[in-house]
Amino acid sequence: MDNKQKILFVDDEESILEIASEYFCSRGYQVITAKTGLEALKFIKTDKIDCCFTDINMPEMSGLELVRQIKLIDNTIPVIVITGYPSMDNVIHTLKNGVVDFLIKPVNLKQMEICLRRVLREQRIFIENMLLKKEVKKKAQLEKINNELLSKVDELNILNKIMIDFNSINSSHDVFKRIVEIALEVTKADKSVSYIIAEGQDRPFEITASVSDHKNRHIKKSENISGFCVGSNADENEALSLFIMENVADKLPLIISKNNGDCGLPVDIHSFMMVPMKIKDNVFGVLVAYKNKDEKDEFYFNEKDLYYLSFMAQTASYTLENLALYENIYENLFSTIYAFVKALEARDLYTQQHSERVAALSVVIAKEMGCSQDDIYVLECAARLHDIGKIGIRDDILLKPGKLTDKEFKIIMEHPNIGANIVGQLGLWNKERQIIKSHHERYDGTGYPDGLKQEDIPLLARILSLADAYDSMVSDRAYRKKMEESDVLKILKEGSGTHFDPKVVDIFFKLYNEGKILFKQN
């Protein structure tokens, strides 16, 4: 056992440690596992460790801090970092601390073993050179390692760019459009195309394509093509369609670095790559990139190009799956909200009309106060739903034509909490939920349900509070007629600093004096 190479695995997930330990023990290594960085450092101090694998995100001590501590104890131990979220900041910071390689999740055990063998081999060579070789050879080795690290940084930079590009996309159309543009940029292809593989169809359906200007390497960004696979002529079209359909069935990436004309590809294609696009292992499309024949251009695709293209296809598929899930969640969410509103309207038509007016006034005030577009959207949504909690109030209280008793008013005071709970159960709308809950809070802390005061009340709720009070006073209610304009304005002025935020009151009167808020005539 003492002669076996000793590997230290550090991860806070016990299942990963168990699987790695069992596998590498069976491959002839001695394995030590640690759940935290602190536990790992104890082994570093007492055992001779040949290599360390560590996750980046861990409790107590991050993987980056663990690397730094290891180098302080023994800077000859190679460390391999495993991460699911590669970023340039992490890469640069970690490389400076002596990490020899990065593995991006998900990784399989075979891939880890190959990486381990290479790292141990390079480490052994590195130590030999440092101890035995002449200064010139040591310098050459260091330059080689530096070039490898720079290449790794470039690779992670490309992967990071791909992920950032797709993270900013919010429509399926843009996913298909962007994937062919990125493929062209990254692989230096002459053309990239995305296809849909439709069940029951014997030909791929072309969705988007991007074509490069061969002379100047300029990219011509395309719009949707929306047609069956087309080549320069009918024979090429048929050959390419048949080739794609024959090879997509195995669900694996394909590269033909140099087309010799014996594989079924059209002869005008010089170098070719194709990767499947899958959701839950079901192929729904393919991404293709190829180079055309050109006697002056001897460029061929390589395995790294295929890796990049595969990563793009996986990222695009993941984005499409998330968009579909997001759209489905929101469709169901809005359907549920609409059902609540319709139920409330059936009981009290005033509530729906009042909420629309309050939403419109709230938006006008928020825009004048310089609120962001996102905040305005949140406020408008919350304003339309601010009284939805009244669905939980009995009709004999909600629709009572006369003055409420103290007991009845306490029941009415529950509607902000009821509304917030309804929206909270639906998820996703945390900001709207807080605004709905706080729209009856008062600036001096005498409001309900939580007695919040001044800045503790969300700004959007303070805006909604004034808009709600104003529309209530200028509208006919079940228990009274609308108030006179002069009385309403007087109440708002007197409520500045007590009931209402003085800044919101000032903005209201500015807009009112400019004629942008008109007295409602119901």
Image: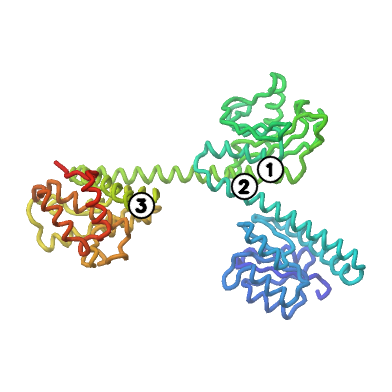
In the image, what residue occupies the spot 19% across and 43% down? 518
Residue labelled with disc 2: 162
State the image quarter where residue 222 is shown: top right
Position of the C terminus, as image quadrant, is top left
Whole-percent x and y of residue 349?
A: 18, 43
Q: Is residue 197 visible?
A: no
Number of numbered discs overlaid on the protein picture: 3
Residue labelled with disc 1: 186
Instruction: Give, as a three-letter code, the residue at label 2.
Output: Ile
In the image, what residue occupies the spot 11% across and 47% down? 482
Query: Sequence order check: which comes first, mark 1 or mark 2?
Result: 2
Provide the secondary structure element on which disc 3 rests: loop
Whole-percent x and y of residue 468?
A: 22, 52
State the image quarter where residue 10 is shown: bottom right
In the image, what residue occupies the spot 63% across and 60% down? 89
Point out the residue furthest to the left here.
Answer: 402
Whole-percent x and y of residue 72?
A: 71, 76
Q: How far apart are marks 1 and 2 (CA)?
A: 9 Å
Q: How far apart are marks 2 and 3 (CA)?
A: 34 Å
Position of the N terminus, as image quadrant, is bottom right
Foreground of the two, 311 or 31: 311
Q: In this view, does 193 lie above or below 17?
A: above
- State if disc 1 and disc 3 touch (CB < 8 Å): no
Q: Is residue 490 visible?
A: yes
Q: Is residue 253 above or below residue 20?
A: above
Residue labelled with disc 3: 370
Provide the secondary structure element on which disc 1 rests: helix
Q: Decide if residue 502 is on the left or right side of residue 172.
A: left
- State if disc 2 and disc 1 touch (CB < 8 Å): yes
Instruction: Give, as a three-letter code, the residue at label 1.
Output: Val
